[in-house]
Image: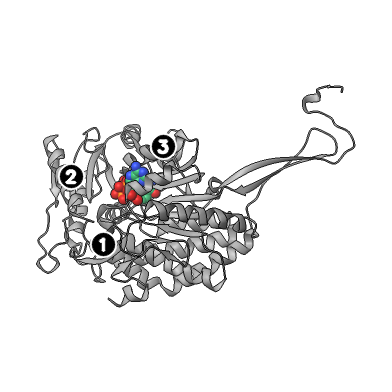
Amino acid sequence: MDFLKKLGIEDTNHGTSTGQQFLGDGSQQTITSHTPVDGSPIADTTVTTREEYDQVIETAQEAFKEWRMVPAPKRGEIVRQIGLELREHKEDLGRLVTYEMGKIYQEGLGEVQEMIDICDFAVGQSRMLYGKTMQSERPEHRMYEQWHPLGITGIISAFNFPVAVYSWNAMISAICGNVMVWKGSEKTPLCGIAVQNIIGKVLKRNDLPEGIFNLITGGREVGQWMTEDERLPLISATGSTRMGKEVAKTVGARLGKTILELGGNNAIIVSKDADLEMAARATVFGSVGTCGQRCTSTRRLIVHEEVFDELKDRLVEIYEDVNIGNPMDEDTLVGPLIDEQAANSMQRALQEVQEAGGEIVYGGQKLDKKQLDGGHYVRPAIVKAENDFDIVQEETFAPILYLIKYNELDEAIAKHNGVKQGLSSSMFTLNMREAETFLSARGSDCGIANINVGTSGAEIGGAFGGEKETGGGRESGSDAWKAYMRRQTNTINWSDEMPLAQGIEFDV
Ligand code: NAD
């Protein structure tokens, strides 16, 4: 495979790097990465040892001393060059994302584009780490605030966005003056190596020290070294709610900071006043895209009873036409699930929803793809269900769309908000009062709420994240950069008196 070679992926890769330099001799424990396309092995990556981990952290601590004093716009210049390098490797990296994770090539390319976009955003942001100037109540005093970097940002990411989520964190964190230690998912280690190789070229060209962008590799245990480690003041973790609860507990116990981006159970409300064709198309992209393995996947469709049957029939029609197969082929819209476990949990969920009284209206079968033997291909499912079924309350990471009926808007919003997660939400309506209600304080309780735009495919310019069991973190655009910095309030007295605040008299 030409793209693997071009990204510097070998049969055996070192999984630990402090920048340009990879550590280890390859004789340790390894992870074999298998492609979900047909289950065949791609390459091996060594798992980071405890000694290597400590070496990485020490190198990062040294690098921080230098990097924090580089002017922020100059840090932005490095990120600008990373964006250019990513443009050069867009097709190859997009192909690797597809090959190692299983999302279709268009979405693989989209992920790399997101990396490029966040680099561009971060370059501009590097000149805008604004603090406020406040009016002091004391004469000839000046008060202002400034933002300083935290130190090492630990980034733990999930398999389903193996490169983009890292860049949302790393590029913003880097311009803020932090150094990064990244542990990607054990299901997609090669994506991490490829990104590290791309960034390494920029570091080398600029003669930067080791320790600014670091990569470590492994599973939960390596992640736990990070969450327990007081040398990492901030942990940004993306993954399941189960993982997030463990991370929050461990980091909270040492009063560290977290940014948590966890599971979603996203819904679209479709009003009787909706443009049904637009609603149908947005729903299909949201529910079958990435084979239902996006945190923002549309999992519940809450439809007004007057248009329920019409929309259901239209969805079935579109689902019948969706091309399922090899994600590397340009005309495929739905690739495989990541692994057997994911395929089994989809089957379990379908079983459970039927036992609860739900009805499968379309799909759900495991597909026999002779030429892709070893991949876990499924037909996306549409299921009539009730919002309070236990299984509907859960995030099943597979393409299952639950159809739920409503009559009154308040009832639709109550159902919409009646789950533990709170990531992305949307309403399709041409009725302005309904739209504004959905976006108001008594509307959607999610971090993202859209009108006539589906639940997935967020732009990087907005702050991304969700409420409740989604974890409350915000990443990417808007003022999400503040989570990577510490705020300092400064008061300067340029008078020759020592007045106290609140007019307190204290004569000494
Ligand atoms: P996962 O929770 O199994 O693993 C995520 C990462 O956490 C991996 O790198 C894993 O090694 C690490 N990890 C697991 N347990 C840990 C622990 N106790 N301490 C430290 N690290 C630990 O998730 P996954 O299956 O890779 O990804 C799917 C999940 O991620 C879904 O729930 C999805 O909704 C969520 N997700 C959320 C967002 C978001 O922005 N909200 C984005 C992508 C994925």
Q: Residue lying furthest right in this view?
A: 496
Find disc 2 in the rendering and name its residue. 383
Mark 3 lies within 8 Å of ligand 1 (Cβ measured): yes
> Residue, x 23% and y 64% (percent of image)?
35
Spatial separation of the CA atoms under disc 3 and disc 1: 29 Å
The disc, 3 or 1, on the residue closer to the chain's N-terminal end is 1
Find disc 3 in the rendering and name its residue. 250
The disc, 1 or 2, on the residue closer to the chain's N-terminal end is 1
Does residue 294 show up? yes
Please identify, in this view, whether the residue under mark 3 or under mark 2 is nearer the observer.
3
Q: Mark 1 packing: few (<14 Cα in 10 Å), some, or many (20+)? A: many
> Residue, x 32% and y 47% (percent of image)?
220
Does residue 428 show up? no
The disc, 3 or 2, on the residue closer to the chain's N-terminal end is 3
The amino acid sitting under disc 3 is Thr
The amino acid sitting under disc 2 is Val
Find disc 1 in the rendering and name its residue. 33
Could you tell me residue 468's position as x and y percent?
39, 36
Q: Mark 3 packing: few (<14 Cα in 10 Å), some, or many (20+)? A: some
451 lies above or below 190? above
